[in-house]
Image (cartoon, rainbow, N blue to C red):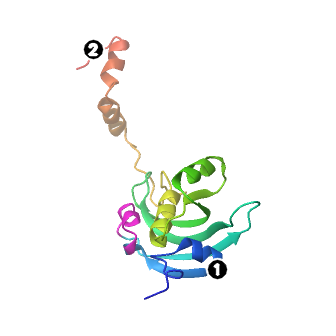
Amino acid sequence: MKSRVTDPRHLEVEAFAQESVRLEGHWPQDELLRLKQSTLPESRADVAWVVQGESREARGGAAENWLHLTAETSVTLQCQRCLSAMTAPLAIESSFQFVAGEDAAAALDADSEHDVLALTRELDLLTLVEDELLLALPIVPRHEHCPQPLAVPVSEEEVAAEKEAHPFAALAALKRGQLPN
């Protein structure tokens, strides 16, 4: 069995930080189930990650435990403009300070530029990486320049049909004094 200091699925954060351990690896996207549900099935790239522990001296108190995380992958999403598949690179770089207790974490997190988490007995790094990648997903994925031109009505019949299909077209006609047919 792997040492809990170096097992990314059961990481002992305090020992990891105090020993300044560095780990890196790859996970298939299929192992990140929530990320998989948020992307198209074509997403197959591995997630490359690196985590570094750090113990910082604190003035007048116990040493601070830190994790520095980087991860990158690419995912396949649906462009919201042209509705075709698109590849989006995802890259994260985050630092986490671990403190004793949820209350201390909430108090520090409100005023801090970095993330503050409560120190737990062990941490599943895969879950943390997945959380950060989900937060990095674009809110509205779209190509910078869609590969296919967007369908635009070109004939007068199509333009007229689109105007009639508009839900307020009849109201607009009434305002102009025209009765609908």
Q: Magenta residues?
A: 31-41
Residue at 64% from the left image edge and 75% from the top image edge: 18
**Residue underneath mark 1:** 19
Amino acid residing under circle 2: Leu
Q: Position of residue 89 (x, y in %)?
A: 53, 67
- Closer to the camera in the image, 28 or 19: 19
Classify residue 65 as left or right of residue 160.
Answer: right
In depth, the one of 77 and 156 nearer the eye is 77
The crowding category of the residue bearing disc 1, from other C-alpha atoms within 10 Å (few below 14, some 14 to 19, many at least 20), is: some
Res 104 seen here? yes
Quadrant where the C terminus is found in the figure: top left
Dot 2 falls on a residue whose secondary structure is: loop
Left or right: 41 in relation to 115: left
Q: Residues within 10 Å of mark 2 (few under 14, many from 20)?
A: few
Please determine whether, in this image, residue 81 is positioned above or below residue 13: above
N-term-proximal mark, 2 vs 1: 1
Three-letter amino acid code of the residue under disc 1: Glu
Give the x, y percent position of residue 41: 34, 68
Q: Please say if 135 is above or below 177.
A: below
Residue at the disc numbered 2:
179
